[in-house]
Amino acid sequence: DNLRYSSFVNYETFPKGWEVPILVYFKETQTPKDQWSVGPGEQANSADAIANGAVPGQVHFFPAICNAQQITAEFAKRGCKKIP
């Protein structure tokens, strides 16, 4: 199955606010729940993270070898959720 934009619960670029970021991040809920706490998901889905406003889901990172401003604009255009 293709990843559905409607399953996104957050996205960001890192370092946040840089004109040319290094990483693109997104978190989604389409991946089976038993995989959400693998790797960086363990911290991103911890009780502390959830208590601080994080939404549970599968974490993804990829190198920003694209126009990061364009990809985040496309995420917004497609209705991807984002934590302020």
Image (spheres, helix red, strand yellow):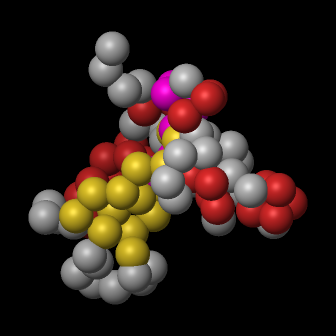
Q: Position of residue 10 (x, y in %)?
A: 55, 51
> Which residue appears at 50% of the width and 27% of the height?
31
* Residue 33 part of the magenta-drawn span: no
Residue sitting nearer the eye, 17 or 30: 30
- Does residue 11 lie above or below 69 as drawn? above
Residue sitting nearer the eye, 74 or 32: 32
- Quarter placement of the C terminus: bottom right
Across the whole image, how many numbered discs are drawn on residues?
0
Q: Position of residue 20 (x, y in %)?
A: 23, 81
Left or right: residue 29 compared with residue 14: right
- Residue 83 visible in the displayed image: no
> Which residue appears at 53% of the width and 46% of the height?
38
Q: Position of residue 55 (x, y in %)?
A: 70, 48
Q: Position of residue 41 (x, y in %)?
A: 57, 52
Residue sitting nearer the eye, 21 or 44: 44
Magenta stretch bounds: 26-31
